[in-house]
Each structure stands twice: as structure tokens, then as C-alpha cells.
Amino acid sequence: MAGLISRKFVPQGQRGVSDVLTMAFMFLLVIFSGVLLHAYGLDAISSATDRQLQMKAEYFYKTLELAQVENYSLSYFEAVAENLIGVTKPVVPGDNIREGICNLLAYLHPDGYGVKVELNYENSFWVQMYLFDLPLELKQELQQEQISDRLRENFKQHGYEISEQAEIRSINTKEWDIIDGERTYVVKEHNKQLNVFFENYTSSLGWPDSTATQFTFSGKVTIIIAEASEEERVAQIDATLTLFRR
Amino acid sequence: MLAAFLVIVFISLLVSAYTHYQVVLSTAGLVDTASSITNQLVLNSLAYESGGNVMEYVIDPDKAASLECREEIGGENFEFQFSIFYNWENEMIMGPYGPAPPEGREISAVSVPVVLYWNDRFEPAKLQVRVWRA
């Protein structure tokens, strides 16, 4: 009735415009509600995936806590703890345990996620990070010790910037350091891939920053130190494992 | 006429969104079930026992072959298949254990780091579990 009355007083041309506008509005409303309705509940999958990643962080931590270093009886965390505390003769030499943890991080990391292992005792830190993989085609550029645009772009894709001043240093035929100011990225070839790591033994890092998606599991590693010069003592080291995506 | 058409479109969208929502819930449920079955395997069914103590997170491969790969969770039946990957330098695989996943069915796969009790040593390994509705 109201429509009939209003139409009676609205000129023909104007009525057409208002009808088109109403139709367009209704059409947009239907599309918008369709998108909203389909988006509803989508976070149920991401929540389930997040719960799974938290579980993976816990399992990763427990693996480093319980699994033994190749050719030794100590676990990975126990071996790091000995080195961190600075016992006179650690069972596993520092270089061996660094190498062992690098290999393990590259092997066990969840697809698309980096892994950070951090142990600290008083003011001493041990931080090792697996960051991402590079395509094997970049090996030639690493061998030539040249930072190409392609290498720089690959780092950028994973959220890491390499400055113009950065340089490459070959360690051996399968390992290179990319030195960028105070940061040194370690690139290691393994299993037809180039794994990129970050290592630091002097301080805790700001990485991964707060913008990264993170899943963390923490605990304490307890070891008994029995050195000839002193009585047995118990040391507790804080350990944290973080899975992250930038 | 146009209003009726828009109402029909809206109702169709509502039905489609409801179906989509059911698929999302079903997928999320399957992902959670895969986590739950993995936890059950690592902390209980496959856990290595030493001197009467269960060592959580440590897998005993001797238990793998005899395990029934079927679980009832929340009134639904699920089947699963699992494999153990170890020796990072030259990767070896134990398994797969359990039935092969059916084709065309929704499957959730999860891979977690674990410790494998092998040759009297605790070795780092990966456990991969694939779960589907029976």
C-alpha cells in the first residue's frame, strides 16, 4: 500500500533509479551474507591445527630431552647443559653437539616452520635455530661467495633481510657462513637441500619476533656435575623449544 | 519477481553455508582425532616399558606389529595407519602398520618427533599417523 502511494507521487525516471539502487543494495547484502555464512566456523580448523602444533612442540622438546646423541650415552639437552655450564671435560664436545642439534632440527622440523632451541644457565646462553630451506640451485652462488638477488629474494620470502654489506664465507664444500653485521647465518647442504640455521652462544635473541606465530614448550634440564676438583653438585638449566612461522 | 529471486538465492546460500560448516566441523574433528590417536600411541600403546615403568615419548617398535589400528572416539569409529622414520642420515622406515587408507575418503595425517628404542639406544625419530573415519 505504501509502495503504491509513494509510486503515485514519484516521477517515472526517479522511480527507476531508486528501484535499481534497492536491487543493488539487496544483491550486495545477499553476497555479503553469503561470504559471512561461509566464513563462519572456519577457525575451527585453524584451532585444531594450532593444538596439533603445540603438541609437536612438546614432542620435539621431549625428543631432545630423551634421545641420545649419536655415539654417546647423553641426551641432546644433557650434552648442551654440560657445555653451557662449562665443565672441564664435557662428554660430548661442543662442536659435535652443535652439529648434532643442527641435523636434528633440520630433520624433525614441521613443514613450513622454523625451530628455536634455547638453553640458559645463569648468564650463559645456547641458542640454535633452524630457519628454512633454500633450493639446491643456489649452491653455485654460495660456492662463488656471491650474494645474488635470487639468494637475497629467497631470504626475503622467508622474512629475513640480507643487507648490501653482507658477505659469504665458505667453511667447507657443504657449509657456508653468510655474515651480515652481527648476524651470521649458517647454510648447510644435506639431503639435496640447503638448510639455513642461526646460532648464537653469547646472548638470548629477539627472534622470533612477536609478529611470528609461535608454539613454545619449556622445562628444566637437571644434571649432576662430578668433577675431580670439587664436590658433586646439581645444576638446573632452563630449556625452551619454539616452533615459529614468520 | 526480483525479490523472490533474491530470497531463493539467499536460501540456497544458507543451505550451502550449512553444508560447508558441517564439512569444516568434520575436518576439524578429524584433525583433533589424529592428535588424540597420536597421543594415545606415543604416551601409551607404543610406549616403551622398562622395569615396569612406562617411558612416555619413547616408542617400542616391538609393540607396533601387534597393535589394533582401530579406535572409537566420541561415538565414532576411526582407523589409522602409522609408520616410523628414523636414521636422519640415511632415512629408514618401519611400517606402515595398520590397514591402507581407503581412496576418496578424508584423511588426516600428522608427523611428530619421537624417541625410538632401537638397538639398546634412544634414537630420534618421526612417527607419522594417518587417520580416517571407518
Image: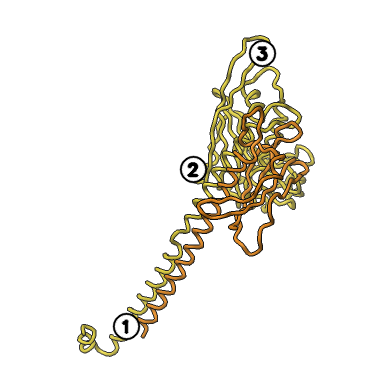
Chain colours: A yellow, B orange
Front residue of this view, candidates A136 and B121: B121
The dot on residue A227 is 3
The nearer-to-camera label among 3 and 1 is: 3
- Report x, y in % for residue A175: 74, 40
Please indicate, yes or no, whether residue B125 appears anywhere in the rendered image.
Answer: yes
Label 2 and label 3: CA atoms lie apart by 41 Å
Front residue of this view, candidates B50 and A213: B50
- Chain letter of mark 2 equals A
The dot on residue A19 is 1
Front residue of this view, candidates A122 and A222: A222
The answer to whether the residues at label 2 and label 1 have Cβ atoms under 8 Å apart is no
The residue sitting at 59% across, 15% down in the picture is A233
- Considering only vertical position in the picture, is A199 above or below A193? above
- Amino acid type of the residue tagged 1 in the rendering: Asp
The dot on residue A210 is 2
Same chain for marks 2 and 1?
Answer: yes
Secondary structure at badge 2 equals: loop
Q: Hey, which quadrant is residue B113 in on the image?
A: top right
